[in-house]
Image (cartoon, rainbow, N blue to C red):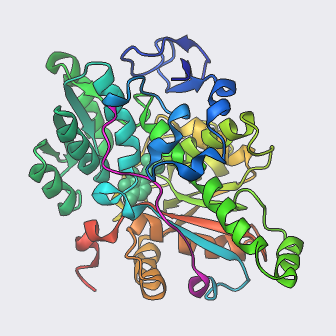
Amino acid sequence: MNVTHLECALCGLRHEANTLQNLCITCGKPLLVRYDLEKAAETLTPESLKTRESDLWRYREVLPVVDEANIVSLGEGMTPLFKTDRLAATLPIKVDLYIKDEGQNPTQSFKARGMTAAISMAKELGVTKLAVPSAGNAAGALAAYAVLAGMEANIFMPADTPRANIVECQQTGANVTLIDGLITDCGKIVAERKDEMGWFDVSTLKEPYRVEGKKTMGYELYEQFRDMRHETEGKSDEDSVSRLSSPVSRLLPDVILYPTGGGTGLIGMWKAFDEMEQMGWIGSERPRMVSVQSETCAPIVRAFHAGERFADEFENASTVASGLRVPKCIGDFLILDAIRASNGTAVTVTDAELTAAVAEIGALTGIFTAPEGAACLPALRKLIADGLVNEGDSVVIFNTGSGIKYLEAFEDQ
Ligand SMILES: *Cc1c(COP(=O)(O)O)cnc(C)c1O
């Protein structure tokens, strides 16, 4: 157990580890977990990972939880990274294109990563009742992990949440309340009622541990790129020479496209890269982080191009990509800081573009992507058109969930 303390992501105030906390007690911003990374690096080495279990708890030195008996797991993480040459061939320039398929997580989305960490810590800290506002997949994951931990799950979702998300929560024993409004309205209800009801609020970034689970995507990219690097190094001289002369970075991809709602995964991966550098795994190089949002709910894209550090609430937010329907998020400055520090950018696509991309990706890769993940493909085409992704770049698009949860989105097709 290497956690030293929690730290406010904005003002830096130090908070005790191992007590139940939501936000910074002075400025109300997210708390991030800090570790003794020197100690972690003694046993967590790239070499040591080769023989570990194939879920995200393989990185346990840089995850919270003191007593391993408190870990609540359904086998999340270590999702495949597919190199997809057929999809890449539809692009106007040659890039190495990869899809990280998070739809293969338990409950069919990467929300499982955050919830395994958050619910394990809630168990360790004695929580019995949980509450969450959710645009969909967070609810399904919370319901599953709460059952496993023997806790009560209270879920507030917009009434127009994809039906699969509502049904899965009901079928896994959660208390589900549908709200005529957006996820931000659901969040207000949780905030109002939680003290009286004795609920612990597991809204993303309003508790410190979901981001810890999601950061493991950054560690996995490092491991998976390393393995592919070794494969290509083992091939003929000619092949490795052409590889070495290409500008593809050796340790991490050049570009990461991330469909952004609350931004937890992007913030988490950025934190993971920082930890890996401190442990001596990588240098100061970073992938260019690209936030992808829907044109009809794009607070981060708007703030990025306006040069703002915080993002105003996006009015009348709507999009079929329900995970992206987050008009205001508490980690806005962390997303925007990471995009800028990485020399990345933020881009919108339309709902028509992202829905069409589901079928295009499906027909070329066999992956039935969530509309959120599919949004990365039209976004990539825009980046190429604008000269922001170049010939020879290695590009990872995150398919953050499975299309199977969004059948309504394909009804008129
Ligand atoms: C929650 C969700 C997102 C957004 O994730 P954040 O890390 O909160 O930005 C994207 N896609 C899907 C499928 C989701 O469920």
**Rendered location of residue 115, percent (x, y):** 34, 41
Q: How far across and down, in percent of the image, does residue 70 sit?
A: 32, 29
Q: Residue at x 58, y 48 (%)?
A: 49
Place of residue 160 in the rendered image (x, y in percent of width and height, measured from the top left): 21, 57
At 67% from the left and 30% from the top, the residue drawn is 42
Quarter of the figure with residue 280? top right
Quarter of the image holding residue 12?
Answer: top right
Q: Relative to residue 258, is residue 18 drawn left or right?
A: left
Side (left or right) of 52 relative to 124: right
Q: Is residue 325 visible?
A: no
Q: Is residue 253 above or below residue 24?
A: below
177 in the magenta segment = no
Give the quadrant of residue 406.
Answer: bottom left
> Which residue is nearer to you in this view: 288 or 330?
288
Q: Quadrant of the C terminus?
A: bottom left
In this image, 282 relative to 221: left or right? right
Identity of the residue drawn at 17% across and 36% down? 154
User: Going 78% across and 61% down the picture, which residue do you hit?
Assistant: 250
Q: Is residue 86 magenta?
A: yes
Q: Which residues are magenta?
A: 70-87
Main secondary-structure element of the magenta-colored stretch: loop
